[in-house]
Amino acid sequence: MEKLEALKISSMRPRSNILDRPLSKGKTEVSLSIVALLFSEIVQYSQSRVFTVPELQTRLHDLGQDVGTRIIDLYFVRERSSKRETKLTQMLLFVKTTVWKNLFGKEAEKLEHANDDERTYYIIEKEPLVNTFISVPKDKSSLNCANFTAGIVEAVLTHCGFPCKVTAHWHKGTTYMVKFEDFVIARDKQMEEK
């Protein structure tokens, strides 16, 4: 009889689907050492399939784009109460804060606008997590594994309606240069006039 009551009680409790849980609760689920191991294996796998550093960076960027596409879809499935950003500055702040916190557990250090080009913005991160555990050989000293993160940022912005190209550069740590399409800037100006 007790078994029947226990079975009845447990069947009444709704089971939570993994897609229904918010992203913020999941940040303690994966240890840093596992992430470091997995990413180093991704870099090694990619390195074995290319011949030059630019090819490796392109491959990491492409893999990052695949991850970014899935991240933004998962975010909007889990966080149903969040609104879609329509202004460029708000979208960049969303990437700098919310996306960065969900991926790396902290915000990016800075978001800057280029003085000479209205289409260019910079996201600055002093010590990217993806570069922390990678040993770069002397013959590949120009390698910046943060191109993986650049791919993620590009996919997130593009899939949210802000098409751009994102590249990673060594400057003040790592700087992600976000260069938007002309129509994105024109649309943003038009929205500000209203």
Image (cartoon, rainbow, N blue to C red):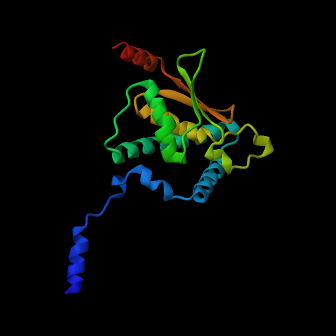
Quarter of the rendering containing residue 25 = bottom left
Residue 190's place in the image compared with 20, above or below, is: above
- Residue 185 % position (x, y): 46, 18
Residue 33's place in the image compared with 138, above or below, is: below
Going 51% across and 46% down the picture, which residue do you hit?
103
Q: How many labels does the image show?
A: 0
Front position in the image: 51 or 70: 70
Q: Residue furthest top?
A: 193
Quarter of the rendering containing residue 86 = top left
Front position in the image: 124 or 167: 124
- Residue 119 % position (x, y): 52, 19
Going 48% across and 54% down the picture, which residue do you hit?
27
Going 67% across and 39% down the picture, which residue do you hit?
144
Q: Residue furthest bottom?
A: 1
Q: In which quarter of the image is the C terminus?
A: top left
Q: In which quarter of the image is the N terminus?
A: bottom left
- Residue 81 % position (x, y): 31, 42
Left or right, 63 with reference to 131: left
Q: Residue furthest right?
A: 138
Left or right, 193 with reference to 65: left
- Residue 191 % position (x, y): 37, 17
Going 68% across and 36% down the picture, which residue do you hit?
173
